[in-house]
Amino acid sequence: AIQRSRTCKLLIYKGRKQPQKEKREMLMLRQCHISSFELFQSPKQSGCSNSRSVSLPRTRFYCNLGRSSDFRAMAGNGETNLGKLYLGMDFGTSGARFTVIDEQGGIRAEGKREYPPFMKEESMDWASSWKATLFSLLEDIPITVRSLVSSISLDGTSATTLILNSESGELLCQPFLYNQSCPDALPEVKSIAPSNHTVCSGFSTLCKLVSWWNLKLPDRESAVLLHQADWLLWLLHGRLGVSDYNNALKVGYDPESESYPSWLLSQPYSQLLPVVQAPGTLIGNLKESIRRQFGFSDDCIVCTGTTDSIAAFLAASATEPGKAVTSLGSTLAIKLLSTTRVDDARYGVYSHRLDDKWLVGGASNTGGAILRQLFSDELLERLSREINPNVASPLDYYPLQSSGERFPIADPNLVPRLLPRPESDVEYLHGILESIARIEGKGYKLLKEMGATEAKEVLTAGGGAKNDKWIKIRQRVLGLPVKKAVHTEASYGASLLALKGAKQNSGL
């Protein structure tokens, strides 16, 4: 794996007038972000050994920093709240990002890292890699910014599952990744869950839990299940067994009744299920050892997180029914704000609760990862410039890295289709981009047919939002307005959750 340079940008306004354009954007952000905070309401409810690692190489770190007094000045003029900052982190499929914002939603710092290649018995040791990246990101935040952070939250990939010893926190097996299917457990899950429930997919968290449970390993009764975001947050606050209702959806949690259903609680492995709270809810204070090591304030709190695609939706501030967000990262995820709840595991469709509305959608295994597998970033940029987005490509592909699809087709055996390959790389890339757009279009069409609010506008988040030609291709294929979101990174959405949790904790 190639370690890419990570970046950090600090935006400081001191001794000069803030540009009018940025003032207008900030006013718009304030209006949108209040709506985002109101989306989540609190529920009513009560390892392996012989690891070898590759050290994380140090890379150049670029910051546009003023003097440290610039940061202290932000809390001046008698308005102490102006100095408080809020940290969000996004743990995606190929790397992680952080964003630090102020109370008005202005970005004060941001940076990224790719996961270091820790290996365990010839396979990737994902848990060690995620943990190393977590603490590397904390170190990357300038100390003058860290000292002002009052709240932390983060997101992780949906249905990425870890099982730990509930006493020691030791991992009892390798993590089950978001795109890992457990078809061996599917018949048992289908026998207990309602027909076409979200968990009735081999990719669901519940199938992964049942598959592990059926191995009948020693001390399985003393285990606890966590999602990727839960586990990373546990490393920060130390309270084992806490999740949020976005991550818990695919293990069977019902966000409408705010509880686990009786058909799930009656199973012997139900004791492994975590306590569920609303995203952005206070869990506890940041560990003292971490506060001391990195220079965070004594009152810095840690809040429940969410999934990466939900965080991207929050970042885009799409608050009206019919507004949709497509996250074009390593994978493709679509989310549509709807007045109607839609769930059907046959098509990989599920709904997350957002206050009195529903965030309906699904996640495909297609996306940017296959592009990176075929093209370098530089070649991708150069070839994209030569594409005419107004002309349809005759090539019909189904771009996947490996067999298996989740949405809009739930088929663990679906084979990638990337042939025939034309002689022209421009035509080949055009065909792939258009084929991914067609998959996206099938997803939105399916949601409408199933009763969700019809999509009226699509905002774009993730790395794919940077490709203007792709946006134009998607707009033609979807037949809808397609725009780049003001904020495209899921880490920004996670920072909004941190801000929400801090406000709730202070009673504001």
Image (cartoon, helix red, strand yellow):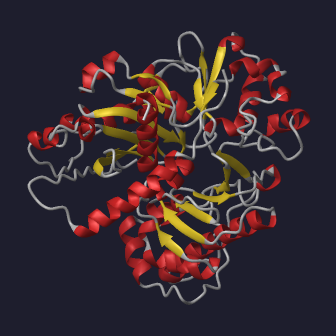
237 and 421: which is toward the camera: 237
Res. 55 in view: no
Q: Is residue 349 left or right of residue 186?
A: left
Percent x, y for residue 475?
57, 78
Q: Is residue 475 left or right of residue 12?
A: right
Residue displayed at 55% across by 80% down:
473
- Residue 257 lies in what quarter of the image? top right
- Residue 507 lies in what quarter of the image? top left
Q: Is residue 386 above or below residue 128?
A: below
- Residue 436 lies in what quarter of the image? bottom right
250 and 480: which is toward the camera: 480
Residue displayed at 75% across by 51% down:
412
Q: In this view, does 426 lie above or below 318?
A: below
Q: In this view, does 368 lie above or below 494?
A: below
Percent x, y for residue 155?
50, 41
Percent x, y for residue 379?
39, 72
335 and 340: which is toward the camera: 340
47 and 221: which is toward the camera: 221
Percent x, y for residue 213?
75, 22
Res. 401 in view: yes
Residue displayed at 71% across by 68% down:
454
Q: Is residue 246 left or right of residue 135?
A: right
Q: Is residue 443 left or right of residue 424?
A: right
Residue displayed at 26% across by 49% down:
8
Picture quarter with the C terminus? top left
